[in-house]
Amino acid sequence: MSNKKKSYTQPVGVEADTPIEVESVAAPKVAPPSKKEISGETKVILRSVVPHLTYVAKRGWPELRWNKVDDTNSLTFDEFVDMRNQQSKFLDKPWLIIETEDVLDLFPAYRDLYASFASMEKLDWLNGSDMDVIAAKLGKVPQSMYSTLLSKVTGLIASGEIDNIKVIKLLEGKLGVKLLNLIV
């Protein structure tokens, strides 16, 4: 034996310079968790979060219209996949929200995206007195949601549910629209 240092992985009695043959053992293949299978004819319900939206499919499927906020239409899963691949802005902006749970399970990124503006459904946070919290939440509202926010807050201001002048001025600054004249 020589005076060379031996590696801790070197078997006892074998020189460090001696090549060691190691039998490789393949790791057992584990199937990745399977996603739910969805039939191409499964109906996917899409709800509009902006008014006056029209989708025209490139394959000749019917033209779909959402005239006002919260209107719904349905597509087959195959049509939905084509929409997602060819006109992703409808779902990524988001102008449309997927209402079909099985489809949301296949695309968890949309669930995360929807959580970022879920507070748009219920605007009770606008009645708080902490202007920093209100400003922070308004800062998270995507620009594509401004028309939805505007339509909801104009109704709330006109009905007297939002009457805090500071909040209304903050909304005016964010939306670029005069709202104080709506106070009754």
Image: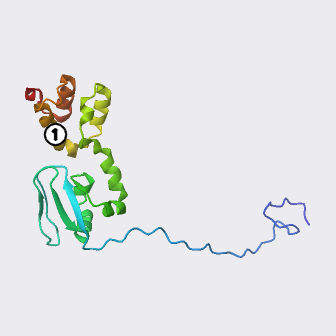
**Other-residue count near label 1 (Cα within 10 Å), few / some / many at <14 / 14–19 / ≥20:** some
Secondary structure of the residue carrying tag 1 is helix
Task: Tell me the residue at 88%/68% (across/down).
Answer: 13
**Labels in figure, total:** 1
Which residue is farthest right?
1
Specify the quadrant of the image occupied by residue 177: top left
The answer to whether any part of residue 125 appears in the image is: yes
Where does residue 46 sit, x and y in percent of width and height?
A: 21, 59
Colour setting? rainbow
Say what amino acid the circle numbered 1 marks: Lys
Task: Pick the quarter of the image with the N terminus.
Answer: bottom right
> Can the viewer see residue 117?
no
Residue 111 percent location from the top left of the image = 34, 53
Q: Position of residue 117 (x, y in %)?
A: 28, 44
What residue do we see at 20% from left, 55% from top?
A: 47
Please tell me in which quadrant of the rendered image residue 132 appears: top left
Q: Is residue 111 left or right of residue 161?
A: right
Give x and y (percent) for residue 149. Answer: 19, 40
Is the residue 76 above or below the residue 158 in the image? below
107, 105: nearer the viewer: 105
The quarter of the picture where residue 119 lies is: top left
Q: Which residue appears at 19% of the width and 31% of the height? A: 171
The furthest residue to the top: 165
Nearest the viewer among 122 and 69 is 122
For the C terminus, which image quadrant?
top left
Which residue is the site of mark 1? Answer: 152
